[in-house]
Structures are given as C-alpha cells and as structure tokens.
Image (cartoon, rainbow, N blue to C red):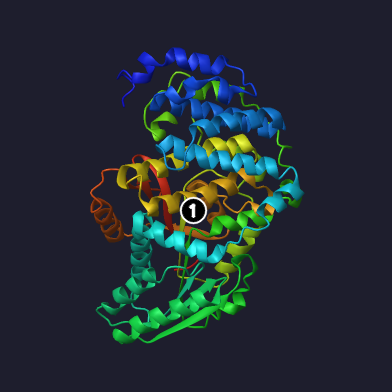
Amino acid sequence: MSQNESSPLKSSSSSSLQVFSMMSLSPSLGSSYPWLKELKSEERGLYLIHLLLTCANHVATGSLENANIALEQISELASPDGDTMQRIAAYFTEALADRILKTWPGLHKAINSTRVVDLVSEQALVRRLFFEVFPFLKAAFLLVNQAIIEAMEGEKVVHVIDLDAAEPMQWIALIRGLSARPEGPPHLRITGIHVRKEVLDQMGHRLSEEAEKLDIPFQFNPVVGELEDLDVERLHVKTGEAVAISSVLRLHSLLASDDEPLRKKLPFALKNSNGIHLQRALQMSQNTLGELLEKDTVNGYSPSPDSASSSPLSSPVSPKVDTFLTALRGLLPKLVVITEQDSNHNGSTLMERLLESLHSYAALFDCLESTVSRASSERLKLEKMLFGNEIKNIISCEGAERKERHEKLEKWIQRLDSAGFCNVPLSYYGMLQAKTLLQGYNCNGYKMKGENGCVMICWQDRPMFSVSAWRCRNSL
C-alpha cells in the first residue's frame, strides 16, 4: 500500500489505537473486556503488536506481574491456526513466557522434564519441509553449485567440504553438473560434517550411488561431531586437491561461543528504553503482517540494518568465528561459499531482538500465508517446529544457549575480510538459474537482487538469505 493511499485503519481505527495506547493493564482484563473478541483483523493485529512490545518491556525490566497480565490478554487473541498476526503472536508469546519461567530454573526444568524430543531428527524433518515448501534453499544451492563448478574448471581432483551435511540433493546436483564438464568429470571427494553418524551414512550412500551411475570417481569422508569442536585435521585435505567449502545456515551458531556464560543466568538484567517503540508501533497502520511492521514514515522508526551493531556484544569482533575462519583459510581453499539468514537477531537486548525478529519472521509468515493453506499440516509443522523454536531461542535464551544469532551480510563481509578472504562475484549464469527457479513458483513475492558481488534472496523487497563467495586474498 502506498503512503498516499487511505488505509482502512487510518479511517476507522485511529480512535481504537489511541485507546490501546492509553489503556492500563489489569489482572482481570481478559474477562472484563469482551470487545477484544470483536476486534477486526487489522485492529487485532495492531493491538497484538502493542501487547507483545508491552510484555517484552515488562519482561526485560523484571516486572513479572505486569508481564503475566499482558500474556493473559495476548492469549485471548493469539492462535497458532488463526490469521498471520495471530499465529506469529502465539509463538512470540510462548517465547516470552519461557523466558519468564527461566527466572525459576527448578520450575522450568520440572515443566520440561517429561518432554521427549529428538532434536536432530526434528531438525532434519523441518529442514526437509523448509526445503520443499520454500524456494530459498533451492535457489541458494543453484548459486553455490554453479560457483563451485566454475571455480573448479580444469581441476582434476576436487574436494568439497560441507560444514553442515544435511541435504544430499545439493551434492547430487553438483555431481550431475560436474559429470557434464567438456573436459570430463574430476575425481570428487566430499567431506560432510554432522552430529549424527546415520545422517552422514545416508548421505554417503546416496552420493556414492549417484556417482557410480555417472561413472565419476568419488569418495565420501564423514566427520561426526559439532562444528564448534571441529579439528581441521579431520578434514584430511591433501596436497594437489582443489578445495571448496560450503556453509549453509551454519556459521551464525558459532557466535554463541563468544557470549558470556553469565548472560544466560540473567534474563532480566538487560536494561533498555522501550516506551518510544511502543508508541510508534501503535501508529503502524497497514493490513498485512509485513506491512503492519513497516517503517512508520511519520515517526521515522524502523529497525535499522545496523541497529544491533551499537553494542559491543554484537560487534563483528567474534573470536570463535574469527579463529574458525582463519583455520579454514589455512586449508587454502579455492572457494568458500556462505549462505546465511540476512537478519539482525544478535542484538544485546531483548527489545532489540524482539523488534528485529518480528520483522523478519513477519516476512516468512506472510510468505506462507500467500502460498500455503492455513489448514496445511506442513505449514503448522514449519511454523511450530522451525520458526517457533527459532523465535524461542532468540527471545528466551541468553549466553551460549542462544544459538540463533543471525546477522546481516555486512557483518559477514567484515569477518571474512578480516580473516584474509576477498569476495568473488557470483556467476551470472548461476543467478539466471536461481531467478528462473524463483519465477517458476508462480508467486510474485520471491525476488533476487545483487549486492556487492553477493546475492540476496528476498520475499517482496525484504532480503531473507544472502549467498556470497570468497577466495583467499593472496591466491591467484
């Protein structure tokens, strides 16, 4: 909606929003205000944003009684199977409630003591669903593979290192691409890193089958373990190999190792000033979730691309990541290709992370709303098991426990530059392939744009994932 168009909320809801901003929360609010159930969808969406920001403010300052009252009211409006704003509010509410419960570690442990979840299997399931429902990873794989194929032109022995070997389809496509080289396929070795041996066994079997069918000399080297604990000697890089390294949605988790262990014990110790955010959020007046969270041109507020960079904790200086990248550079790779979420979820304060994650997950939820039925079981699983768990980790956790530390491309560029890498512009042919894939989804929302030699895969005009390629600065 353009700024000059008249929004239904501007004409019919301004008085309601003024009431929202002036209203004080009371313990009996949910039962004493039946008008909550009568709110129109747009009004309800605005009010849910107001309540989430109010609740987060109370949580951040340790005002647990007021936070509880806000949570009770949000629960009257939020729903995991409702409209887009109701669904996203349900998961942010759960995350805020979990953060409160961590104030009483015994209570939190007791409530979760009988919860049996195979996290690795769950992650594998939701990653497969994400791959099937969204085109983001498919487009990224096309860009990564084409960059590797072009970088390895003429090489006779190619060693690809996958820092998170979870998706065999990426490398099946690469094997097929290398088999079509005019000079013939190289001897290919793929090293996969994963925490679970059976995942690597399955990948090795599938890749070996494909290579055998195409008569490509192939070897799979499984490395079982956490990336954080990786000893590069286990990668068995040999003299004469042309090495390519691929990291898909993995490097950001290393940032958790640099945080203070005490942070996870102090969920309410982070001070911030949030009143201005509450007032400005109330004045957002468009009618889709992404638009509800768009920049308020009157007040000039929107999460800045660098809003998390003002604090030392979110600075690009990250010893664990820096050490890891330096170790990778020591392998003298011919190419390193990195795919990451392009979001600011590593701010030092709760309110920073809440505002930024509301914007980024708004885009993902809007994407599902535009492309998948609300009743879809796959959509419910994705929202709960993937997005819901990520939101909970971003909002509820601190210290080393907070793994979902997505950051913007600019910060990764700084880190890689400091580690001795320089950017390699991604292939025009790879970009053409990825763009064709996105257009094939019959949805105008998926877009792609180049930025500083890298590629941003977008929903509407919001970058969602970045893909960038790198080589050692002093290599030819």
* x, y percent for residue 134: 35, 53
Front residue of this view, candidates 364 and 144: 364
Write down the quadrant of residue 159 in the picture: bottom left
Q: Is residue 400 visible?
A: yes
Are there few (<14), some (14-19), or many (20+) residues within 10 Å of tag 1?
A: some
- What kind of element bears circle 1? helix
Front residue of this view, candidates 30 and 319: 30
Q: Which residue is mark 1?
A: 386
* x, y percent for residue 292: 42, 29
Front residue of this view, candidates 73 and 1: 73
Residue appearing at x 73%, y 46% in the figure: 263
Residue appearing at x 43%, y 56% in the figure: 468
Left or right for 347, reference 371: right
Q: How many marks?
A: 1
Front residue of this view, candidates 78 and 404: 78
Question: Which quarter of the rendering shows the C terminus?
Answer: bottom left
- Note whether 402 is above or below 365 in the view shown: below
Write down the quadrant of residue 138 in the picture: bottom left
* x, y percent for residue 455: 38, 52
- Note whether 11 is above or below 269 in the view shown: above
Residue appearing at x 34%, y 70% in the figure: 149
Left or right for 332, reference 268: left
Left or right for 471, reference 259: left
Q: Is residue 312 visible?
A: no
- Note whether 446 is above or below 289 in the view shown: below
Q: Residue type at mark 1? A: Leu
* x, y percent for residue 242: 44, 77
- Note whether 306 is above or below 115 in the view shown: above
Question: Which quarter of the rendering shows the N terminus?
Answer: top left
